[in-house]
Every structure is written in C-alpha cells, then in structure tokens.
Amino acid sequence: MKRSEMLLFLIIVIVIYTAVNYYLFRTAKLFLPKHVNIFAIIFWFLVIAFPLGQLLERIFPSFLSDALVWVGNFYLGAMVYGLILALIFSLYQLLAVIFPSFKINFTDIQRYTIFWSNFLLIVFIEIIGFYNSEHPHLKEFRIKMDISRPLNLVFVSDIHLGSSSSRMRTQRIVELIQSEKPDIIVLGGDIFDGDIQPVKRQHKAEPIFQLKAPLGVYAVAGNHEYIGGGLAAKNYLKTNGIRLLEDESVLVDSLFYLIGREDRDKERFGMGQRKTIEELTHSLNQSFPKILIDHQPYELDKKAKAGIDLTLSGHTHNGQLWPFNYITGWIYEVGYGFLRKGNTLIYVSCGAGTWGPPIRTNSRPEVVHFEIIPSDTDHE
C-alpha cells in the first residue's frame, strides 16, 4: 500500500471513528442530567484507549500498552452496540417530531434508568461474547473425493494472535486440533493479527508451534500477515516448523495436491503479484485431487473451472458481531459455510479467533475436521 493511500485511509478511519463517538457522547448526555463531566472523562478515555495502546505498542511495548489495547478493543465492541441503541433512540426522536403524540417527557429517574439499562445490556453482550470467543468448538464433516484412502484433515483459520488474544484460547484451539488425530493440519491465514512483536514478547504462538501431524502442518498467509509486515510474519512461521505455501503446491503422500495461494492483498502491500488459479494448477497431474487454501473467498468460478476439488477459506469471520454477518453475506458469494460449484466444494470458515473486539455474538469460533473418504466408499 502506498504511503499516500495509507495516510488517506487513516484520515478516513479517524474521521469516522471520531464522528461516531461524538454522536454517541451527545446521545448519552441526554440521559445523564448530572455527573456529565465524570462521564465525559471516562468515555473519552475509552475512545482513545485503542489508538493510544496501538501507538505505545510500537514505540514502548509494555504491560501498559497491552492493557490499553485490551480495554480499547472491548470498547470497540461496546461502541457497535451503543451505536445501534443510539440509532434506535434517534429513530424515536424522528417519529416524535413527525407524530407529536409519540413524544415522552422523561423524568430524571427515567433517564437514568434507560441509561443504566442500556449500559448493563451492553456489558451483558460483551461478557457473553467474550466467553463465546474463548471457547472454540469442533465442526466435523465427511466428504467424498477421488482419493486412494481415507484422510483426516483439520482446518483452522483466522486465529489472530496479538495483544488482545489470550494464550488460553490458543491452547484450546490446539487441543481441539490434536484431539482429532489429524493426518494433516492446515492453517488458513491470519494466524497473526498484525505486528508480531507482541506475540513474540508474550510467547503467544508457542501452542501453535507445538502442532503435530504425520503428513505435516501447512499454512498460507492472510491479509493480516501482510498488515504485520509480511516477511517478518512469514519467517516467524517458517523458523518454527510451519510449512508455508507461497503460491505453490505440494503432492502430499501421493494422495492429493495441497495448493497454498498467496493472499489477494499481497500486491496492495507492495509485496509483488500472486499467481492466478490457472498458473497454480495447469502443470499439475490431473489424476490427483486438488485442495486449495486461499484465505479470502474470491474467484470461486475460476476455482471451479480449474478443477479444484475442495477450496478452504476464512477471512470473513461470518461478520463476528451481529449484525455484520448480513454485510459479509452480501459481500461474498458465500460468507460462511458450504457452497458447491460444479465439482468444486467450497468451505468458508468463520475462524477460530477474533479481530478487534475479543467477542463473538453471531457464531461460535471453530476448528473444522474434514474426514475425506474415497468416492467409491458406500458409507455416506
């Protein structure tokens, strides 16, 4: 990404973030006839916690920067649901203007009651969402493929190791993976959230580096690996025993081709172009099945045309927070789950981790076990 593009992007984000929070502050003040000054101090501290923590993380990483990032990320989740509640109130105000009979003259006690009820609702959502995000579950599927013997493949995407990821969650992910006794493990990108220095400093990736499978542990880079610098994240994986596939394929145990595709954001971050689907597949022995790992679920028609048997992606998080799942469902041909195109089966995982707020409110984080059986097997 060019410096000018990055600067413009940051300016737009700052403007939107400031505008949204100013709107929230002005709306919340309507329900706090007293103690507004105390509320203002707490509110604007929460607003600046995340950007301040991110800044400190780069110039002086410490417990303070970690704490600010955690607090700021939780506030981002609260901001989303605070905005929804504020918009509902603004809709009421609009209706009260159009239909004066709707207008209610709230007493101070009623205002406080509304404020604290909404506050407790948001806290409840955050607690439930955090608990959900910390407890990934296992999803199991049996699929048929022109393969010579059964295969256990475990796929996990979007772990997002970073300042606001817990080692306990990562350990649970690893335990789920290993509990399935996989023949092969595939990591579908966004293993890191961004800058890998907090991950190194807090040894957060160590459980991932302990993964073992007879046919190997493979990974591809996601867009967040490039956000974190690209080469540093990739080298960190390689030096710790993860086989990173960078626009390349490998014939696994004379069973199938595993094709690892570079992320589509590679070029945007000035790391060169990635290969096309056709370039990745045209020279392969077509008698072997082909499993493609591509972090972002785009170009599905091209993948079907190239004869890919199974495509595994992540990236979308299924929106992570309700109601963003409706947005990802609109953007992507498949935002979560299965889709079949011709002979190509596509699976998009909602991921095992979180980006930004360490909460999930519309789906459970997942580790996916595919039991791949030969096509001529009678058992369904």
Image (cartoon, helix red, strand yellow):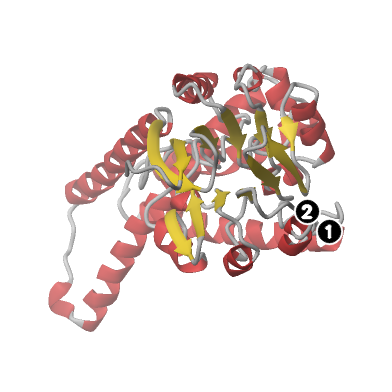
Q: Residues within 10 Å of mark 2 (few under 14, many from 20)?
A: many
Residue at the (63%, 35%) spot, across then down: 191
The C terminus, quarter of image: top left
Query: Residue 350 in the image: x percent, y percent?
Result: 46, 46
SS of the residue at dot 2?
Answer: loop
Q: Does 315 sit above or below residue 187?
A: below
Q: Nearer the viewer, residue 172 or 178?
A: 178
Q: Nearer the viewer, residue 84 or 32?
A: 84
Query: Residue 58 in the image: x percent, y percent?
Result: 77, 33
Residue position for label 1? 273
Query: Is the C-beta separation of discs 1 and 2 under 8 Å?
Result: yes
CA gap, disc 1 to disc 2? 7 Å
Ranked by sequence position, the earlier of labels 1 and 2 is 2
Q: Quadrant of residue 34?
A: top left
Q: Is residue 40 visible?
A: no
Question: Which amino acid is tagged 2?
Answer: Lys
Question: Which amino acid is tagged 1?
Answer: Gln
Q: Is residue 201 toward the left or the right of residue 359 in the image?
A: right
Residue at the (79%, 60%) spot, across then down: 279
Q: Is residue 210 toward the left or the right of residue 111 in the image?
A: right
